Image (tube, rainbow, N blue to C red):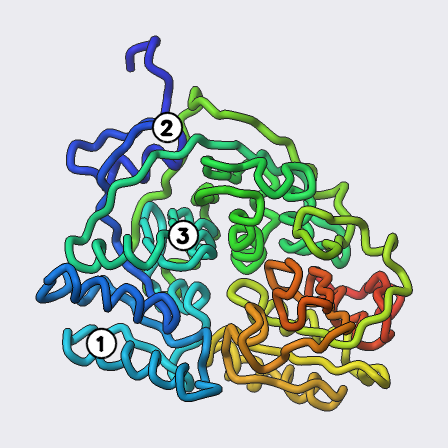
Amino acid sequence: MDPATPGRTITEKIIAAHTADGRARAGDIVTVRPDVVLLNDVSGPLAFEQFEAMGAQRPFDPARIVLVADHFAPAPDITAAGAIAMTRDFARRHAIPHFYEPGRGGIEHTLLAELGLVGHGAIVFGADSHTCTAGAFNALGIGFGSTDLAGALAMGQLWMRVPDSIRVTLSGAPGPYVTGKDVILELIRRLGSDGAADASLEFGGPGLAALSMDARMAIANMAVEAGADTCVFEGDGLSQEDMARRGAPAAPAALADADARYRQVIALDLTALSPMVARPPSPADGVPVSALRGEKVDQVYVGNCANGTLTDLRQVAHMLRGRKIAPGVRMVVVPATQKIWRAALAEGLLDVIAEAGAAISTPTCGACFGGHMGILAAGETAIATTNRNYRGRMGHPDSRVFLASAYVAAAAAVAGVIVPPEDVAPVQEDAA
């Protein structure tokens, strides 16, 4: 290598592998060919209309298109039913094998990984901002508008700017009741809501080994809340094992060169973290849970595209086992996919959760984005494992949403107010 030429980041390497000439440096404008194009029942119909308006006759590769009905699913009204019908019809007319609706799929970003459709070095283009969740799997998930995705449907490629990279070096290991959610809330607190604008967050370091794949998903999912274009974790033995378990094709891990250049380097000691809560109306307003002790809640919501995993459901069951939801509080728990729902059923987790008095939903994005199945009324307060808490995000503009891990959310369901998890369930071996 020419000593005057710096090494490449993970992001640059993955993007370069998806260009015609194999070149990509931060700031370059390149044409990228993704491995997967991902659309849901909100973004899909808009893209389908533009696809037709372009005069496109057929998608570039039906096998590399994934359509998921998850936002307004199960359909709460006629308009939503029509959007899902349009998505279903597009899949049928173009022989797209990867179409999933209630009872057969789940929330798109969790489902994509579960199906083995994303892994080391892959690129996913999705018309949803949380497509960055793919970063947990040593892949790049990049969000585009529906019109852009119409072009990707037709041609199998789009142009984009190669983002700068911000390196996040992890060290140590999380303590009791500290999760991936707490890691990302702390990082967003440091960066702010736009501190990673035009950049890719790249996670690595010795602390990575202490984070499960579900914890990595929780972190990757909220990279966009720091303004990032995308994010990516280093590939390692754990991600390799995960790919094999999910049936994803074997692929070498994408790793940065030792002399790669970064816009910024952040050191994050996992050992020093404590459970966090982000106060409304910003994911960047994170504080230790102890700072909010006693804050009353009306609704507790566990579930979204990265915090409805089996790990999250185990954490909820740990907090609820032998306890009841506090009077005046309602709790909604949403497994992210049908497979996770069934696994939680087989483990007895759903029985523990239901016995405590919580409602258990079929997989859906519903309340997370303020669509249905858990909307807040004026003056109500929720604590949720979702990814956004902007004003009106989960319902009425005069409602409030605090963001937290499944441990912290479930502790609030029992106490009726926000409390540290250990106030409800003393630390035990199965709490990790």
Amino acid type assigned to the residue bearing label 2 in the image: Ala
Q: How many marks?
A: 3
Identify which residue, 307 or 119, lies in the foreground.
307
Amino acid type assigned to the residue bearing label 3 in the image: Gln
Helix, strand or loop status at disc 3: helix
Helix, strand or loop status at disc 2: loop
Q: Is residue 186 above or below residue 402?
A: above
Q: Earlier in the sequence, mark 2 or mark 1?
A: 2
Look at the image and tell me whether residue 430 can be seen.
Answer: no
Residue 332, position as x, y percentages in the image: 66, 80
Residue 405, position as x, y percentages in the image: 69, 62
Mark 2 vs mark 1, CA separation in Å: 36 Å
Write down the residue under mark 1.
91
Residue 327, position as x, y percentages in the image: 86, 85
For the point 63% across and 78% down, which residue is it?
A: 375
The quadrant of the image that shows the N terminus is top left
Helix, strand or loop status at disc 1: helix
Q: Quadrant of residue 333?
A: bottom right
Label at residue 26: 2
Amino acid type assigned to the residue bearing label 1 in the image: Ala
Label at residue 240: 3
Residue 286, position as x, y percentages in the image: 74, 49
For the point 50% across and 79% down, which residue is it?
A: 363
Q: Is residue 91 above or below residue 167?
A: below
Mark 2 vs mark 3, CA separation in Å: 27 Å
Q: Is residue 368 left or right of residue 66?
A: right
Look at the image and tell me whether residue 38 can be seen.
Answer: yes
Q: Is residue 191 left or right of residue 4?
A: right
Q: What crowding class fits label 1: few (fewer than 14 Cα within 10 Å), some (14-19), or many (20 or more)?
A: some
